[in-house]
Image (spheres, rainbow, N blue to C red):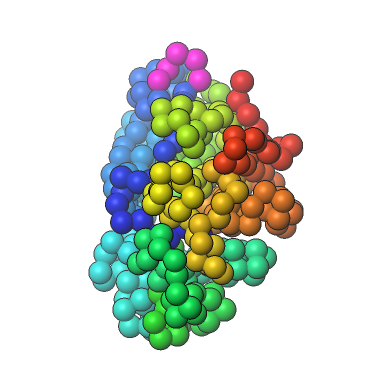
Amino acid sequence: MNSQKPSPNNRRRFFALAAGTCGAWVTSCSRQSGMRKFSQSSKALGAKVTMTAVHTDEPTANAALGAAFAELERIESVMSLYRSESQISRLNRDGLLENPDALLVEVLRFAAEVAKKSGGAFDVTVQPLWALKGAQPDAATLALVDWRKLELEEKRIKLAPGMAITLNGIAQGFAADAAMRVMRAHGIENALIDAGEFSAHGNNAENAPWSIGIQHPRERDAFAALTRLENRCLATSGDYETAFSDDFSRHHILDPRSGESPGELASVSVLALTAMAADALSTALFVLGAKRGMEFLRHYTNTDALLILKDGRRMATAGFTLAA
């Protein structure tokens, strides 16, 4: 699965598009009576985060955006490996975390569910493999990777000696969901959250579904496809994000069971009801490969995927909505 990336510059590349003639992130273009688009950006979990609210009232929109960014600050204090005193940094350092934040427990419980259903293709304990940076893992390092050895209780999380976790591959999605919950609690019914994964609700300023361009895995400045979110969330895992070889055969997405980079797929995009699910499932599908990945996806309702193989062929479920 995705191991923690060393640089925020190597994050998933998406492009948010507004329908018609209005460009992405424009605040004044609207075809709805009085509706305007308001956007703010900051950094969280090692990457740029942009949130957009569509509303008639600027103070309401700005208050919602401010509260959503405050929620991201809380999440980062719990889940960021870039902060030495975050809860997962302390867990990795000490092997034990007492009284974990409920948000961390929620994320780790969902991660365990995906790990079990995927046969270990998704595993938050993959972090020790990242230190190898694409090199062949040895048996001792592989032995440290096993989600079943993570002891998770409401008041206590424990790792076996030498183990470490990364929430890259799930935390960005969770952050997008959390930000959207805050926005809606502040009365924003039309919004788009880009936290590396996308969460969308309602419509854009032109009263059309939010449309997202998915990065082409081999053409840096091109889309592979356009998709409409329609109150679903989007995440993509790709071999191009951090490659250790020119042919993309070794990259940052690792099979936790072997330590190797999966060799069949170039990218996997998942539409799901939550960004956390889309985030984790895109990684699991990438590791499992096309056939087993599509079978695994049947565990999840209202969830669809677009797979691009390394040879350029594409596979998609019937419900993966492509924009015209």
Image quadrant in which you'd find residue 271 = top right
The residue lying furthest to the top in this view is 21
Residue depicted at 50% across the width and 20% down the height: 19
Can you say whether 257 is above or below 47 in the image? Answer: below
Residue depicted at 36% across the width and 39% down the height: 50
- Looking at the magenta stretch, what is its main secondary structure? loop
Q: Is residue 279 visible?
A: yes
The residue lying furthest to the bottom in this view is 161
Left or right position of 167 against 59: right
Can you say whether 164 is above or below 226 in the image? Answer: below
Q: Is residue 184 visible?
A: no
Q: Quadrant of the C terminus?
A: top right
Residues 87 and 46: in front is 46
Residues 159 and 200: in front is 159
Rendering coords of residue 86 (x, y %)? 31, 69
Residue span colored magenta: 19-23
The residue lying furthest to the left in this view is 84
Image quadrant in which you'd find residue 194 = top left
Residue depicted at 56% across the width and 51% down the height: 263
Residue depicted at 52% across the width and 52% down the height: 279
Can you say whether 310 is above or below 95 in the image? Answer: above
Residues 202 and 240: in front is 240
Image quadrant in which you'd find residue 227 = top right
Query: How many marks overall?
Result: 0
Residues 74 and 85: in front is 85
Rendering coords of residue 72 (x, y %)? 35, 54
Rendering coords of residue 178 (x, y %)? 45, 53
State yes or no: residue 189 in magenta: no
